[in-house]
């Protein structure tokens, strides 16, 4: 009887320890987290230019409402922690990229493996993501680009990617393939790309459409 009680008690302790280690997974942070869990995954989502400022749901005359709140909510998942900063108006891309790079370094210094960190960026947020990637130059970090590779990025060689790079673009959009990033850096750990066709141009990423969201979440869980 005592042995049975001991086994039950031990199982309860192990379950409690397991729950404690997982209890913070799936959190959404709008500021850098105070407590870092080295065994968990972290994703940084950087939004597009139109969201900079005070409005979390701005509207573009051509592409409609950028529902940042809905996108942020849809990106959450129990398998990783989401860090989604709301940038102020007139943010200098290189300065914010330095902040992102510093935050990644803080995670790594606290025991998080680079392969468990993802930088995810859309449009201007993707440009910032690329600049942060260039500053970090990590082989194992994950970078996901959404509608990033337009004329500005393509014409300026300082936009480089490192590590494991994934890209999604909308076929009706001005921002097309990111293949040239692989040509710029022959030392990429990996590169993969897919396209979607919604007819919504840049606005395809203004909403959490399953065409891109499902693929992105799959990549972030790998």
Image (spheres, rainbow, N blue to C red):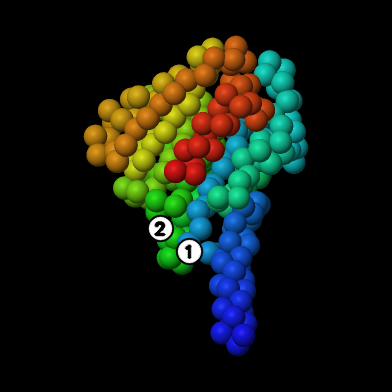
Q: Quadrant of the C terminus?
A: top left
Q: Quadrant of the N terminus?
A: bottom right
- Horizontal and vertical percent position of residue 205: 60, 26
Quadrant of residue 213 in the image? Answer: top right
Alpha-carbon neighbours of circle 1 within 10 Å: few (<14), some, or many (≥20)?
some
Alpha-carbon neighbours of circle 2 within 10 Å: few (<14), some, or many (≥20)?
some
211 versus 219 height, above or below: above
User: In terms of depth relative to the viewer, which is nearer, 194 or 149?
Assistant: 194
Q: Residue tagged by mark 1?
A: 38
- Specify the farthest residue to the front: 1
23 versus 186 height, above or below: below
157 versus 143 height, above or below: above
Do tag 2 and tag 1 residues touch (Cβ < 8 Å)?
Answer: yes
User: In terms of depth relative to the viewer, which is nearer, 118 or 26?
Assistant: 26
98 versus 188 height, above or below: below
Q: Secondary structure at mark 1?
A: loop
Q: Residue tagged by mark 2?
A: 113
Q: At x 61% / y 40%, what residue is drawn?
A: 75
Residue 73 in view in this figure: yes
């Amino acid at each position: 009887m005592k042995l049975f009680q001991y086994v039950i008690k031990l199982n309860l302790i192990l379950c409690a320890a397991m729950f404690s280690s997982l209890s913070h997974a799936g959190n959404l942070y709008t500021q850098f987290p105070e407590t870092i869990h080295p065994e968990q995954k972290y994703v940084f989502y950087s939004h597009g230019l139109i969201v900079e400022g005070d409005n979390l749901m701005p509207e573009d005359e051509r592409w409609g409402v950028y529902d940042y709140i809905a996108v942020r909510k849809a990106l959450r998942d129990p398998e990783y922690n989401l860090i989604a900063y709301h940038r102020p108006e007139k943010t200098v891309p290189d300065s914010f990229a330095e902040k992102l790079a510093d935050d990644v370094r803080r995670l790594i210094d606290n025991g998080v493996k680079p392969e468990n960190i993802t930088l995810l960026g859309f449009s201007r947020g993707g440009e910032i993501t690329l600049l942060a990637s260039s500053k970090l130059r990590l082989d194992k970090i994950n970078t996901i680009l959404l509608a990033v590779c337009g004329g500005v990025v393509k014409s300026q060689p300082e936009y480089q990617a490192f590590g494991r790079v994934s890209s999604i673009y909308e076929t009706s959009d001005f921002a097309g393939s990111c293949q040239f990033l692989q040509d710029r850096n022959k030392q990429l750990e990996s590169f993969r790309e897919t396209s979607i066709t919604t007819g919504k141009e840049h606005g395809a990423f203004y909403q959490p459409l399953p065409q891109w969201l499902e693929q992105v979440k799959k990549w972030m869980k790998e």
